Image (tube, grey):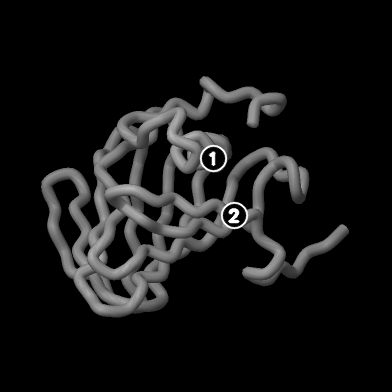
Protein backbone atom coordinates (compact mmCIF):
# COMPACT_ATOMS: atom_id res chain seq x y z
CA UNK A 1 0.00 0.00 0.00
CA UNK A 2 1.28 3.44 -0.93
CA UNK A 3 1.80 5.86 1.98
CA UNK A 4 3.57 8.88 0.46
CA UNK A 5 1.81 11.17 -2.02
CA UNK A 6 2.87 14.20 -4.04
CA UNK A 7 0.82 16.92 -5.69
CA UNK A 8 1.42 15.17 -9.02
CA UNK A 9 -0.50 12.13 -7.66
CA UNK A 10 -3.64 14.14 -6.99
CA UNK A 11 -7.02 14.14 -8.67
CA UNK A 12 -7.04 17.68 -10.08
CA UNK A 13 -10.29 19.64 -10.36
CA UNK A 14 -10.30 23.15 -11.83
CA UNK A 15 -13.19 25.46 -10.93
CA UNK A 16 -13.72 28.46 -13.20
CA UNK A 17 -16.31 31.23 -13.09
CA UNK A 18 -16.57 33.87 -10.35
CA UNK A 19 -14.19 32.07 -7.96
CA UNK A 20 -11.45 30.34 -9.97
CA UNK A 21 -9.29 27.86 -8.09
CA UNK A 22 -7.72 24.44 -8.42
CA UNK A 23 -8.17 21.54 -6.01
CA UNK A 24 -5.76 18.66 -5.67
CA UNK A 25 -7.41 15.77 -3.81
CA UNK A 26 -4.68 13.47 -2.52
CA UNK A 27 -6.33 11.28 0.11
CA UNK A 28 -9.89 9.99 -0.29
CA UNK A 29 -11.77 6.70 0.16
CA UNK A 30 -11.51 5.62 -3.47
CA UNK A 31 -7.71 6.11 -3.64
CA UNK A 32 -6.34 4.98 -0.26
CA UNK A 33 -9.30 3.13 1.23
CA UNK A 34 -9.66 5.56 4.15
CA UNK A 35 -13.02 5.66 5.87
CA UNK A 36 -12.48 8.63 8.14
CA UNK A 37 -11.21 11.63 6.18
CA UNK A 38 -10.26 13.22 2.88
CA UNK A 39 -7.32 15.57 2.36
CA UNK A 40 -6.06 17.80 -0.39
CA UNK A 41 -4.47 21.04 -1.48
CA UNK A 42 -6.15 24.08 -2.94
CA UNK A 43 -4.69 26.86 -5.05
CA UNK A 44 -6.88 29.97 -4.93
CA UNK A 45 -6.17 32.34 -7.80
CA UNK A 46 -5.22 35.99 -7.06
CA UNK A 47 -8.36 38.10 -6.46
CA UNK A 48 -10.45 34.93 -6.12
CA UNK A 49 -11.98 33.08 -3.20
CA UNK A 50 -13.56 29.98 -1.78
CA UNK A 51 -17.18 31.19 -1.56
CA UNK A 52 -19.22 31.07 1.63
CA UNK A 53 -20.32 27.54 2.48
CA UNK A 54 -20.61 25.10 5.37
CA UNK A 55 -20.54 21.35 5.93
CA UNK A 56 -23.54 19.93 7.77
CA UNK A 57 -21.72 16.88 9.14
CA UNK A 58 -17.98 17.26 8.60
CA UNK A 59 -15.25 18.88 10.62
CA UNK A 60 -12.54 20.58 8.59
CA UNK A 61 -9.02 21.76 9.25
CA UNK A 62 -7.44 24.34 6.95
CA UNK A 63 -3.70 25.04 6.94
CA UNK A 64 -2.31 28.00 4.97
CA UNK A 65 1.15 27.40 3.53
CA UNK A 66 1.50 30.10 0.87
CA UNK A 67 0.12 33.48 -0.10
CA UNK A 68 -2.09 35.84 1.85
CA UNK A 69 -5.76 36.53 2.28
CA UNK A 70 -8.71 36.98 4.60
CA UNK A 71 -10.75 34.34 6.42
CA UNK A 72 -14.41 34.84 7.27
CA UNK A 73 -15.42 32.12 9.73
CA UNK A 74 -18.72 32.52 11.56
CA UNK A 75 -18.42 35.98 13.17
CA UNK A 76 -14.60 36.03 12.97
CA UNK A 77 -12.48 37.79 10.36
CA UNK A 78 -8.73 37.25 10.28
CA UNK A 79 -5.74 37.66 7.99
CA UNK A 80 -4.41 34.52 6.34
CA UNK A 81 -0.67 33.97 6.06
CA UNK A 82 1.59 30.93 5.99
CA UNK A 83 1.27 29.01 9.24
CA UNK A 84 -2.40 29.91 9.87
CA UNK A 85 -4.58 27.00 11.01
CA UNK A 86 -8.39 27.13 11.04
CA UNK A 87 -10.68 24.61 12.72
CA UNK A 88 -14.21 24.40 11.29
CA UNK A 89 -16.84 22.40 13.17
CA UNK A 90 -20.00 21.31 11.32
CA UNK A 91 -22.45 24.03 10.24
CA UNK A 92 -20.02 26.96 10.55
CA UNK A 93 -20.10 29.15 7.45
CA UNK A 94 -16.70 30.01 6.08
CA UNK A 95 -15.16 31.91 3.17
CA UNK A 96 -11.52 32.50 2.20
CA UNK A 97 -10.43 35.38 -0.04
CA UNK A 98 -7.07 35.72 -1.74
CA UNK A 99 -6.04 39.37 -1.25
CA UNK A 100 -2.57 38.98 -2.76
CA UNK A 101 -0.97 38.98 -6.19
CA UNK A 102 0.13 35.35 -5.89
CA UNK A 103 -1.92 32.18 -5.41
CA UNK A 104 -3.18 31.45 -1.88
CA UNK A 105 -2.24 27.85 -1.02
CA UNK A 106 -4.05 25.82 1.63
CA UNK A 107 -4.43 22.23 2.71
CA UNK A 108 -7.85 20.96 3.73
CA UNK A 109 -8.74 17.87 5.70
CA UNK A 110 -12.36 16.83 6.15
CA UNK A 111 -13.84 14.16 8.40
CA UNK A 112 -15.92 12.32 7.42
CA UNK A 113 -15.00 12.31 3.73
CA UNK A 114 -17.50 13.09 0.99
CA UNK A 115 -17.02 16.75 0.11
CA UNK A 116 -14.48 15.81 -2.57
CA UNK A 117 -17.43 14.38 -4.54
CA UNK A 118 -19.31 17.70 -4.30
CA UNK A 119 -16.27 19.54 -5.66
CA UNK A 120 -16.51 17.54 -8.89
CA UNK A 121 -20.12 18.71 -9.26
CA UNK A 122 -19.19 22.34 -8.51
CA UNK A 123 -16.53 22.15 -11.23
CA UNK A 124 -18.93 20.83 -13.86
CA UNK A 125 -21.63 23.36 -12.88
CA UNK A 126 -24.18 20.81 -11.62
CA UNK A 127 -24.02 21.93 -7.96
CA UNK A 128 -23.21 24.92 -5.78
CA UNK A 129 -21.15 25.31 -2.63
CA UNK A 130 -23.70 26.60 -0.09
CA UNK A 131 -24.42 23.79 2.40
CA UNK A 132 -23.16 20.29 1.89
CA UNK A 133 -24.25 17.12 3.65
CA UNK A 134 -21.68 14.33 3.49
CA UNK A 135 -24.37 11.68 4.01
CA UNK A 136 -26.00 12.73 0.72
CA UNK A 137 -23.17 11.00 -1.12
CA UNK A 138 -22.66 7.26 -0.91
CA UNK A 139 -19.42 5.56 -1.95
CA UNK A 140 -20.93 4.69 -5.34
CA UNK A 141 -21.65 8.29 -6.34
CA UNK A 142 -19.07 10.44 -8.11
- Which quadrant of the view contains residue 5? bottom right
Which quadrant is the N terminus positioned in? Answer: bottom right
* Relative image position of residue 49 (x, y in whole percent): 28, 56
Give me the residue at 42% from left, 48% from top.
Answer: 60
The one of 36 and 32 positioned closer to us in this rendering:
32
On screen, residue 95 above or below 114: below
Q: In this view, does 5 lie to the left or right of 72?
A: right
On screen, residue 68 above or below 56: below
Give me the residue at 50% from left, 38% from top.
Answer: 124
Give me the residue at 46% from left, 61% from top.
Answer: 42
Q: In this view, does 46 lie to the left or right of 114?
A: left
Residue 108 got which mark? none
* Relative image position of residue 68 (x, y in whole percent): 26, 75
Name the residue furthest right.
Answer: 1
Mark 2 / mark 1, whichever is N-terminal: 2
Residue 120 got which mark? 1
Which quadrant is the C terminus positioned in? Answer: top right
Residue ID for mark 2: 25
Amino acid sequence: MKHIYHKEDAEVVRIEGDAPRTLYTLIQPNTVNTEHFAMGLEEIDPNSEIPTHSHSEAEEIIFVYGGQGKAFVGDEVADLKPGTVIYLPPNVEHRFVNTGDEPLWITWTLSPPGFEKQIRKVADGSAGMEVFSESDYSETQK
